[in-house]
Amino acid sequence: MTVLLIMLPMALLLAGFGVYAFIRAAKAGQFDDLDTPPLRAVFDDELEGKGSSGSG
Amino acid sequence: MSTLAVETSAGRRARAACSCSHCGLPVPAGLFEEGAAEQFCCAGCRTVWGVLHAGGLEQYYRVRAAVEAPSERARTTGARYEELDDPAFRTASVRELEDGSAETDLLLEGVHCAACVWLVERLGRVTPGVIESRVHVRTRIARVRFDPERVALSRIARALDSLGYPVHPARGQAARDARTREDRRHLIRVAVAGALAGNIMLLAVALYGGEIAGIDPLWDGVFRWVSMGLGVVSLAWPGRVFFRGALAALRTRTAHLDLPIAIALLAGGAWGVTNTVRGTGEIYFDSLAVLVFLLLVGRWVQHRQQRAAADEVGLMLTLTPTSAVLVAEDGSTRRAPIESVAVGSLVEVGPGEVVPADGVVEVGHGAVDESLLTGESAPVSVRAGSPVAAGSVNMTTVLRVRVAAVGEGTRVARLMRLVAEASERKSPIVQLTDRIAGRFVLVVLTLALVTTVIWTVRADAHTALEHATALLIITCPCALGLATPMAMSVALGRAARMRTLVKSAAALEALARPGAMVLDKTGTVTEGRMSAAWFEGDDRLRGIAAALEERSAHPIGRAIVAEAPSRPAAVACEHLSGRGVRGRVDGGLAAVGSPEFVADESGVAVDADAVRRALDAGLTPVAVWAEGIGSGVFAIGDRVRDDAAEAVSALRAMGWSVRMASGDDPAVVGKVAAAVGVTDAEGRVSPEGKADLVTRLCAASDRPVVMVGDGVNDAAALAAATVGIAVHGGAEASLEAADIYISEPGVRPLVELVRLARSTKRTIRICLGASLTYNAIGATLAMCGLMSALLAAVIMPISSLVVVSIAVRPLKKRGGVR
């Protein structure tokens, strides 16, 4: 059972990392517009180079 | 044209006999060009096609074919958009970025599908200097980043216009950004609360398992401490909003749902920490974390729904014109944003345009429609020297207006101040949940006290506190906090599908209880524009009248033209101002105009009975006569909507008292009121008078007072009313002042809205009943000391689940309101 002493902090760390990633994504505006990106993805056929990230 | 292009076009023509090369709709015979490779149904499509091919964006057609059958004609306005280059606009709406580029938001009409997104985001291909354009398909706002050194904003706007997306500057960028940040904070709170609740639940499973099957005290302690750590984070971070809300409620001495929630969270948290430190007893953190999460989800759902309605109204405000045509000293004209119009400048107002500022007509004569400001349905004639007010619509020829007042000084602005005062005076609607929350807190605290006293006597203080805490947590108004927002957001969604935008859930709730409803006349009960109610005489006369009035810009003339199915050609037309038109149609003499004028012209008597009937109905009689046919009479006026009478009686049947208040002539108001079955009607009511009437009604009873209107003259009353409802075609002032905006014409949506409010209230009542039952059972168990942490952990989510499913389901099953 002592394995839990490692597992528990690790699990919490992982969860914390997930939450941190989500917060960063939300603050970067990844969830501002959930309607347009699916439409945008339909026509990524041409090679346009840089896929720009969300607006700040 | 290359051979290849001709071949492909020929092939395309073989498939569809002759469809537009851009939109695919049939090409009208008159526009068919013999032998041309490409055919177009309209100038707009030709422009867009040209731009796409010149810019190497032909792929658009492939993209579009993949998403939908093309069906919409391209709309290009050909506007110059010079106002976007004006320094006044640049400082207000264009942001300079660090790298020397600039960014602005533009609202694009017509963006609706993947192909539109594809096209708009490749704007840089046809307009060098555009660095990036990103469009949001739901709000139709494009954020364009460009190099101001290389390209002017007006050129970008013209490029978008030539692609078929007319451009409007999207003002209020700062407010929009603030709302977006608020949205993000909401979402983050929900996510953090969810993650914490999930992890604490995992630990709780271990702890409950240990309670049943036994657990090593070391691990029991570890799990409890970790639970506490996560639980405290949950209360202190996402849960903070409830404490803040509770504090605000205490400070303003109002009941708010946050108060009982904060008490439960605080008591549970304190007891949980104590028990963790002591190493024995319940710790509650699993229940608390789930509680925080569920409550936040409920709030978030409702917030999103209300936000969508507010966005939609904001966009409609953006669509109203915000530029004016300035006339310079040398007589040249240029379009400039409204901000650069100053007192003393000369502006030009074209037919159909809105007068941008208060002033005096200097050149031109015609008629302006002041109905939005005054409620008067008949246009007012103006000539050089007549005053005109901002917000009125020029109905006829071009007018040049010397500006006398702008912005804050205009009559519209004075009316808007009235709106601000009215909304400050109005007391906010107390929602059912908050009313209950007040009593709820009292009852729960009393019960907790009773429990503490009883158990202190029967056992010891420690057991007493333990049971009291369990009581506080189990009775925490989770269902109240979750079910009501859910039911509300379902209702708001339904309303949005009926094209009714509800800006606050409280307003919808207030509509459930019948009270007094005050209807505006012009544009609400009536259509708000001139049309022919009926015609008596030979049917050929309709066409003849239309032929004579063809060139007329007067609303009555337009009504006659709109009414005729087809018209012959008229020659030698002579317009006699204020009287009528005479001319020759099909070789014979003909005349149309006031009955006296036509009688003079023709020498025959006009049907006096028809003229009287028109006057009796509050309509304007217009006579028409043609040589060899005879005479006829049109009755023209602002027609009462077809559904008005039925809607009024439906509202009556639901217990509402309906009255009418209008700025129009009392005789006309009386007739319209009689036609729809309203007995209590007032005419010539000033905007202040309407607001007073509403305030008086509000003071007279505790029942809701609903104002329904469309104009600037209604705005103050809309703001003063318990619930202000702006209807289709309203002015921006009324949109801002109202709680609810109905974007479908007619009075019928009003009835549906009231029905929706009633069914929503019923659902909420059922939810409350169910959740109070749960709470009563839980409280009893807790008071008897039978509420173990495990039982609490099971009952809480089940009760929430049941209540939420009640909140969401019945509306769906009953098929709602229709």
Image (tube, coloured by chain):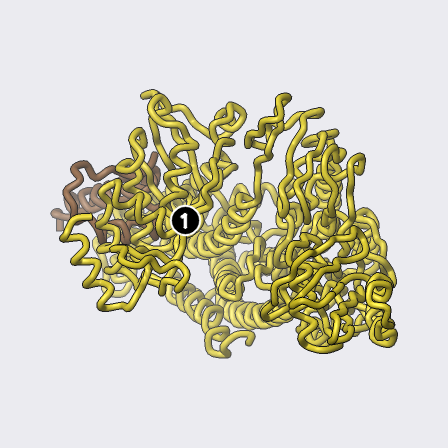
Chain colours: A brown, B yellow
- Locate residue B807, reporting x and y percent: 49, 69
B224 with respect to B155 (left or right): left
- Locate residue B402, reporting x and y percent: 72, 30
**Residue B452: quadrant of the picture:** bottom right
Is there any visible trace of residue B71 in the rendered image? yes
B421 with respect to B817 (left or right): right
Q: Read off the chain for label 1.
A: B
Q: Amino acid at mark 1?
A: Gly
Q: Nearer the viewer, residue B396 or B376?
A: B396
Residue carrying label 1: B272
Is the residue A22 above or below the residue B95 in the image?
A: below
Residue located farthest toward the front when viewing the structure as drawn = B587
- How many C-alpha atoms fall within 10 Å of the one at disc 1: few (<14), some, or many (≥20)? many
Residue at x 42%, y 57% (from the top left corner): B294
- Disc tally is 1
- Locate residue B535, reporting x and y percent: 73, 74
Is the residue B497 above or below the residue B337 in the image?
A: below
B684 with respect to B69 (left or right): right
Q: Nearer the viewer, residue B404 or A4?
A: B404
- Locate residue B793, reporting x and y percent: 38, 62
A40 with respect to B788 (left or right): left
